[in-house]
Amino acid sequence: MKTATVEYRVPYADTDQMGFVYYANYLEFFERGRNELMRSMGFTYKELEAMGIGLPVVEASVKYIKPARYDDLLCIEASCDWSKGIRLQVNCRVLCGEQLLAQGFTIHAFMDLNTGKPVRPCREFVEKMGSGSSLCCSESVGAVHLGIQPR
């Protein structure tokens, strides 16, 4: 399982009135981790989008353990937990030093940006992820719609 890490120093703008990192910002931290994970696999969101593929979040979960505060240096870890058909789960952990602050996951669906319909992941993505499938990006997976408007 590939894991990517990124450091992030908490700016004052990320905190709430109590001095804690605002709870919704942890999902942004997860996104930072996902971006680095994709980059470590040889892909960026920009490249996938150029191929006409999007990865919208269809489910997210965060378990808050201890709050991060202004000026904390965070380590954000992201790893691909599983990929099945059109879905992909990325697990994330947010640490400050050795202290686990939050953990959770996001589940994504591969989507054709032009039609808003689900598609199978491209061969290159699957190979770099190491799951061994040979499905093509443009292969549609039926009439299921993600409820996202096409461009």
Image (cartoon, rainbow, N blue to C red):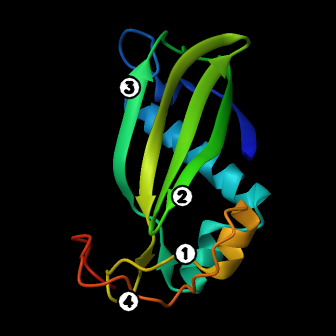
Precedes in sequence: disc 1 or disc 3: 3
Distance between the Cα atoms at labels 3 and 4? 33 Å
Q: Kindly report the distance in space between the C-alpha atoms of the residues bearing marks 2 and 1.
A: 9 Å
Residue 98, horizontal then vertical, whole percent: 72, 11
Residue beneath label 3, please? 23
Q: Give the percent coordinates (x, y) of residue 108.
A: 43, 58
The residue singled out by tag 2 in the image is: 83
Mark 2 to mark 4 CA distance (whole Å)? 23 Å
Quarter that holds the N terminus: top right
The mark nearer the N terminus, 2 or 1, is: 2
Number of other residues with Cα within 10 Å of mark 4, as a class: few under 14, some 14 to 19, many 20 or more = few
Of pointers 3 and 4, the one earlier in the residue sequence: 3
Give the residue at mark 1.
Answer: 121
Label 4 belongs to which residue?
114
Distance of label 1 from label 3 (alpha carbons):
31 Å
Question: Crowding at label 2, few (<14), some or many (≥20) Cα neighbours within 10 Å?
Answer: some
Spatial CA span between label 3 and label 2? 27 Å
Q: What is the distance, in whole Å, between disc 1 and disc 4 at their CAs?
A: 15 Å
